[in-house]
Image: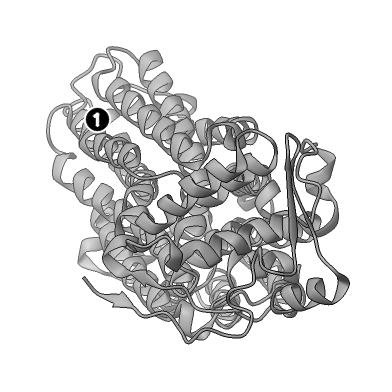
Amino acid sequence: MASHPPPEPSSNSNKGWGEHEEIHVSSGGVQAYTDDDADCESRRPLLLGTPASAECYSVSAAAFPFFFPALGGLLYGYDIGATSGATISLKSSTFSGTTWYNLSSVQTGLVVSGSLYGALIGSVLAYTIADFLGRRKELILASISYLIGALLTAVAPNFAIMVVGRFLYGIGIGLAMHAAPMYIAETAPSQIRGMLISLKEFFIVLGMLLGYIAGNAYVEVVSGWRYMYATSTPLCLIMGVGMCWLPPSPRWLLLCAIQGKGNLPETKEIATRCLCRLRGQTSPDLVSDQVNLILEELSYIDEEKQVGFREIFQGKCLKAMIIGCGLVFFQQVTGQPSVLYYAATIFQSAGFSGASDATRVSILLGLLKLIMTGVAVLVVDRLGRRPLLIGGVSGITVSLFLLSSYYTLLKDASYVAVIALLLYVGCYQLSFGPIGWLMISEVFPLRLRGRGLSVAVLVNFASNALVTFAFSPLEDLIGTGLLFCGFGVIAVASLVFIFWIVPETKGLTLEEIEASL
């Protein structure tokens, strides 16, 4: 078992709830009374935004708290990939295996975007249940919704049941994409938190690739669409069983105790045991300092007060909301759903022999997305979030203006479109793809993280729906070239937003990020 040794202790490493503090525990929560000098000294590392210390952890122990939540992302990606092949199979008179294969454009849209509507519903549900259930139970609920939705879709005797299955699966997506980055962020060591949350994006892309492969394998099989959707059910079961086995988030446990929903000393002991398990440490003494720091940060605000809707748009949560919602909004409105829509057409115009088969083109793009996401995973904790965002979005901007030029001025230069498409996909997976989900899981204060992140996830799916549904009418109104030019202008605006608004969070604990905001 590989492990990372703890750093040399600093002069402040054993303070936490130390000798300068008197602690009072009441039914309303915990209050810490310190003299002004001790208070300033104990919070100085947090206020400066510099890491107080590195966390001791075992790589093998950190793997499972990442893997099972990340399956929620893989199942989301699989649905995107499988649905592209399922719609071809479902509408085929030869291979659909149904009497209701002659779907209208509205019915086809419900099949394709049914899970997106469900994800919007799941995001709204997450706002009310996230802090009540906790991150782990929310992921268990997501796995159940995934499983029921996949089974209903696969065995659907008619179109109505299939749409219900698509909605239920989408609710699982909304819950999983809300809780998974939150659980990973709250349980991962700060040194590898960026890598692990970015690796969740890698799992989403891997799921898309697996979905494309399943679509290609079953597209010419009678009732092949049923097999495409049924293939995801074992993963749903693995995710649910795995989340039942994992411990709850120690930060969520401590937050509940601070808010008067449990006995603090007892909860602190449970949280310490959970953190020991998550870090692979057998001695509670090795993680007690971190538990104390979490409690210390929570004690500086009025935690017993109930969180109201207005509060998530005030103070440091407002700044976190601007950062998180801004990133996921720009992630979608820079044309991400639309550029991929044109992939098959661009490859066909370039004369690639395999381009006539949309499923094979999707597999090629899926491989590129997987490779570039892997690069982002490897470098995000070394280079930081801002350099990847600025560099990647700059590439996205160039690619969008190249696509605009192709559709307006360079229609005979098909290689320009191919280069632009590949550049867009690669740069997106280096920047907005993984970093968007990473940042929204890091910047929200612990007390408001569940609700704040649910709003950000809702903005993500809502802006995705907006771009998806508005693309065709806008294309008819102003033309493809001008539309991609418009996406390019929005990408320039996103660069300005990143440069002036988005902070660097590399190497900081969640408590240090919260204090710096």
Q: How is the image coloured?
A: one colour
How dense is the environment of label 1, judged by Cα within 10 Å: few (below 14), some, or many (20 and up)?
some
Q: Please determine whether, in this image, residue 419 is positioned above or below residue 329.
A: below
Position of 149 compared to 179: left or right? left
Q: How many marks?
A: 1
Is residue 462 visible in the rendered structure shown here?
Answer: no
Q: Is residue 111 above or below residue 288?
A: above
Query: Residue visible at 40% across and 28% down?
Result: 145
Q: Is residue 144 above or below residue 414?
A: above
Circle 1 sits in a helix, a strand or a loop, which is it?
loop
**Position of 361 compared to 332: left or right?**
left
Task: Please identify the quadrant where the N terminus is shown.
Answer: bottom left
Residue 142 placed where, x, y %? 42, 34
Q: Nearer the viewer, residue 298 or 474?
A: 298
Instruction: Point out the image quarter for the C terminus.
Output: bottom right
Choose top left, top right, bottom left or bottom right for residue 128: top right
Q: Position of residue 232 (x, y in %)?
A: 25, 38
Q: Nearer the viewer, residue 243 or 378?
A: 243
Q: Where does residue 219 sit, x and y in percent of width and height? A: 19, 40
Above or below, 388 relative to 304 = below
Residue 407 quadrant: bottom right
Judging depth in this view, the residue of 74 and 108 nearest the camera is 74
- What amino acid does circle 1 point to? Ser
Q: Which residue is mark 1?
A: 92
Which residue is drawn at the image coordinates 52% and 74% (left, top)?
406
Residue 405 rendering spot, x and y as whole percentages: 58, 76
Q: Is residue 486 visible?
A: yes
Task: Tell me which corner region of the image, top left, top right, bottom left or bottom right, holds residue 58.
Answer: bottom left
